[in-house]
Image (spheres, helix red, strand yellow):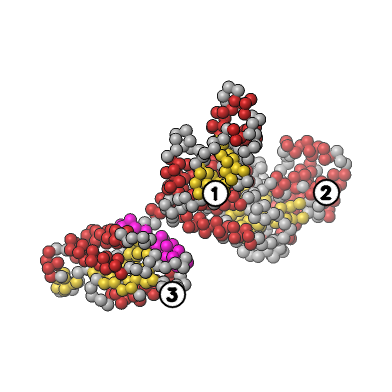
Amino acid sequence: MNEMQHYGQTYCDNTISNSNQTHILQLLQDESIGDSFMQVLEKKEISTLFQPIVSLKDGHILGFEALSRGPKNSMLESPAVLFDVARLYGKLWELEFLCRIKALENAANINQEYLIFINVDPNIINDENFTRGFTKEFLKGFNIDPENVVFELTEKNTVPDIHGFKKLIDNYKDQGYKIAIDDTGAGYSGLKLITDINPNYIKLDMALIRDLDKDGVKYALIKTLYEFCQVTNIKVIAEGIETENELNALIDIGVDYGQGYFIQKPINALADIRPDVVKSITVRNKKKSALYNAKPTTVFVGDVCRSNLCLEPYNICEKALQVFNENKALMGIPVVENGVLCGLLMRDKFFAELGTKYGYALYVNRPVSMVMDNRPLCVEYSTTIDVASKLAMNRSSNNLYDYIIVTNNNRYFGIVTVKDLLDKTIELEVNYAKHLNPLSGLPGNVLIEQKLTEVINHDLEFTVLYIDIDNFKVYNDIYGFEKGDRMLQFLARTISETAAGLNGADQFVGHIGGDDFIVILDSYDVEALCSLLVRKFTDGIKEFYSRQHIDNQCIIAKNRHGQEEQYPLVTLSIAGIHNRGKTFADIYDLTEQAGRIKKKCKEIWDSCYIIQ
């Protein structure tokens, strides 16, 4: 939150920051300031604004943060001034209590699914007055349950007795109150407070959020904090979100909740957020979900690129120098004119030019077009990550770590770094590997469901083949699980190699589990494939049986009752279903219809295929 929001809470300490001392002394020269302040207390001229805290997963509102303001259009409207004057006059507690009462009055009858966040200084939470102001009986008068109240601890002063403080916090938790640590990342002792009291929420300071999408160090830090909070079951709230790019970066990291001017400015009502903000959040999450189980060969570089500060070719080098000095994490600046890329200015090369003899004097007042790279690596949005990575690594060593420029329909779109490509490639490969069947190495159920949903929703022609082995359990029981696993691996290879041999057809092969496999093809012409699969399987399984069993075309073995019984050799069933002339509501509708075809296959005592 900004400075005005930050002080617009119920803080209580007896000091004034050095930065405000001079300002307050100036105010005190106005003899009316004291009378005005006392009038605020007497007439209870405090208003409350509310800013929503929303889920960055689906856009639903978690709760509202209460923000206090003084009389409108007066010196005391600013919460920073209001609270500092209260400190000087020794009326901090009175103001504190008034702000809280106003917040609770305005939040009375709050929807029970919403939380109300109230800022509290750790040093007053054990004050007797504070305790009386948060009894269940007191809150009942406002129709507010303790479970709807979150104490947002603002660590402006150190906590002298951390053990006693922790015990006190546990007592409040036992009564149903929730705890949030505010301004995480703004100070040096915030992490210790987190580990000591184990809050329900931590709120990331807006200084960490600002330009997050452009700052790799901030991005890495927030990602680490988020991963720590996942392990400790703490939810993360990002404060001060002001741009869509900051919002998108937070969603990509996985941060749970957010608030800020981009989502909604503080207003005097508990209001819903705009539909376009909810849509922005849900669209980004769908995009993130699609990337989660993808591979570098299928993800576009445009899906992982980010925005960046730009200059125009006629801007002078002095301005570029100023931009680099003000943005220490900025490694490069694209040079763009009317949406068209002109070149690229990388920090190291730019400073090298200025650092030469006479370089500064020569270039400082000249346009950046004189020192920029006129031919940076530029790729279209639809270039896949693996291709973009190869192009980047094929550059000369002098340009190896320069930004890669991304365009969309030949218009400048954003930048991506070699590190971005490497990180995303590793992330995609690891995520994809997590969903592969360990026995066959083929995609498992998560990826299968994703692919089925994709083909159903895209309304293009497709055929789905469900493949399984009949009489496999008998084989496993007699020959053992090790040989059974080898048979499954043989079938997995056979399906993959045969499907890959289809000319021009896009195919997906997955392992549902056990002896069940699936093939998804963008074609209705699949009978030749099914016929070839049956033939290859029938020929190949001979290697898995003894000569006697092959000659007899059956297995004679004792059953569980000790009696000899004749068992058939394994066979292959293929049940095929396509969308020619029909639609499916979802994957469950498709699998239900495929199950009926599969049942017909089982009635045939030999390897076979049936295509609906």
Which residue carries the number 2 mark?
74
What residue type is disc 2 on? Ser
Which label's residue is closer to the chain start, 1 or 2?
A: 2
* Residue in the picture at 47% in, 72% down: 585
Of tags 1 and 3, which is closer to the observer?
1
Which label's residue is closer to the chain start, 1 or 3?
A: 1
Which label's residue is closer to the chain start, 2 or 3?
A: 2
Of residues 370 and 203, which is closer to you in this image? 370
* Residue in the picture at 12% in, 64% down: 547
Tell me the number on the disc at residue 410: 1
What residue type is disc 3 on? Lys
**Residue at far right of view:** 31
Q: CA distance from mark 1 to mark 2?
A: 52 Å
Dot 1 lies on which element? Answer: loop
Tell me the number on the disc at residue 237: none
What residue type is disc 1 on? Asn
* Residue in the picture at 51% in, 39% down: 376
State the quadrant of the C terminus.
Answer: bottom left
Of residues 139 and 151, which is closer to you in this image? 151
How busy is the neighbourhood of tag 2: few (under 14 within 10 Å), some, or many (20 plus)?
A: few
* Location of residue 508 by image quarter: bottom left
Q: CA distance from mark 1 to mark 3?
A: 40 Å
Total marks shown come to 3
Of residues 475 and 541, which is closer to you in this image? 541
Dot 3 lies on which element? Answer: loop
* Location of residue 503 by image quarter: bottom left
Q: CA distance from mark 2 to mark 3?
A: 69 Å
Position in image of residue 141 (x %, y %):
72, 64
**Residue at far top of view:** 357
Of tags 2 and 3, which is closer to the observer?
3
Which residue carries the number 3 mark?
582
